[in-house]
Image: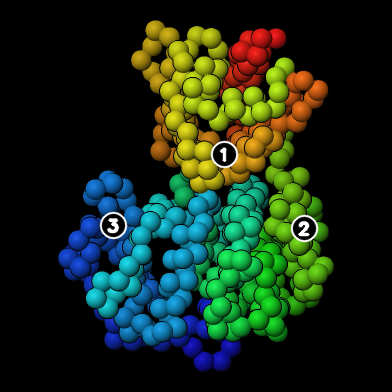
Amino acid sequence: MIGRPQDGARTEIDVRPGSFVPPSPAELTARLPNLEVTEMLGHGGMGVVYKGRQPFLDRAVAIKLIRPDFSNEESQQSFIREARSLAKLTHPYIVNVFDCGKAGDLFYFVMEYVEGNSLRHFLSQKSVSQRDVLDYLPQIGEALQYAHDSGIVHRDVKPENIIIDRRNRVRLVDFGLAKWLGSAGIDEPRDTAVAGTWGYIAPEQISMPESVDHRADIFSTGVVCYEMLTGQVPRDGFQPPSNSSAADPRFDPIVGRALERDRERRYQQMREMNADVRLLTRTPESTLNLRWTIHAPIEKVFEAWTKPDVMANWFAPTDDFVPSAVEVDLRVGGNYRLDMRPKDSTEVFMHRGQYCRIEPPHLLSFTWCPVSRGPNTPETQVTIELRPNGNATDLTLIHERFPDEADLDRHQKGWHGCLGRLASKVDAADGT
């Protein structure tokens, strides 16, 4: 691409059509014998993405290739950079990479298959509501904060690289332009080049690309937020979102600070922006906020939320349940499974999720989905905050992103019962 890039196009990628004909799913299956490739999902400037399956693990995957006609050293480095970046990041709101390799002239990696559509798709359909903004933005922020804490700057945050799955969970994708910082850094010439997508890149990505840091992603997130609220990308001299749309005016200072051209005046961390966003998202209509005092040390209460044998003993809304079946993989991105069954019943209430933040013994955050209610049940998020109070522990449970008040009311009753059982079980175990 020559000259000024169009909106939505990366600045450094030549997307002129070449002679490349993507291999058919059958041809690719023959070249990648450990995979069953079922269909092509799409292809762009230099990559092709397929849907497939890992038969041995019985899971759906996405397979991404570099176009061989673009397999020069630079594109190969971009590919390797993306695979390494994704392999370093395990988080519920970032797509997972499972494998990477080369088959003949094809570089490929295998990653999590997400059944959903890009944020660009929903924006083009004009179907992004303000409630959606309140759901998506904190997830984007958590994904980026985790990447930044891991020493990685995305450098290409835009609607095309944000996937929304059928449970309303965000996945950040495409780390092909990622920059590694600090101890995670890798000395690469491209880190001093202009990289990103026109309309979404921060000013310093153009004026001083060699010194770009995590604050560039904060600027890009501000652009995405502005576009979700107004349907437009902000230009020089842009007006606050509420001036040109029905956006809540409380978004105006948040967007304005994220879009500061001087990065020293911007939010300095994504968690700061997320804290301001959550003042809007955690409304009484969409969020439970319960407080309880547990008469046990903070370490014992944290253990009650993270050890399967302890959780099984109390995690149910009433005493009319048998001990729950619990599995825990206690790490960020790790899965948990929680099945509750009433006595004298064969019905099982199944819940699944992943851990978002783990800061023992003070904080635990995880996604929450009652899978027994169907495959399209919206996912929500639970955060447990613990603070010592003498010999006791003050517990705050924040359960957010409820799509309707009826679901919130059901969970409020259930959590009241669970926390009551937790208090009595832990108190009894502690001998108080």
Cα distance, mark 2 to mark 1? 25 Å
Q: Quadrant of residue 264?
A: bottom right
Along the line of sight, which residue is nearer the eye, 288 or 217? 217
Relative to 308, is 61 on the left or the right?
left
Give the number of the mark in front: 3 or 2: 3
| Callout 1–callout 3 Cβ contact below 8 Å | no
The structure residue drawn at horizontal position 67% and vertical position 34%, both measured from the top left corner, is: 361
Mark 2 lies on a secondary structure that is helix
Earlier-in-chain disc, 3 versus 2: 3
**Residue tagged by mark 2?**
254
Mark 3 lies on a secondary structure that is strand
Earlier-in-chain disc, 1 versus 3: 3
Three-letter residue code for mark 1:
Phe
**Residue tagged by mark 1?**
366
Quarter of the image with the C terminus is top right
Three-letter residue code for mark 2:
Ile
Residue 333 locus on image (x, y percent)? 51, 46
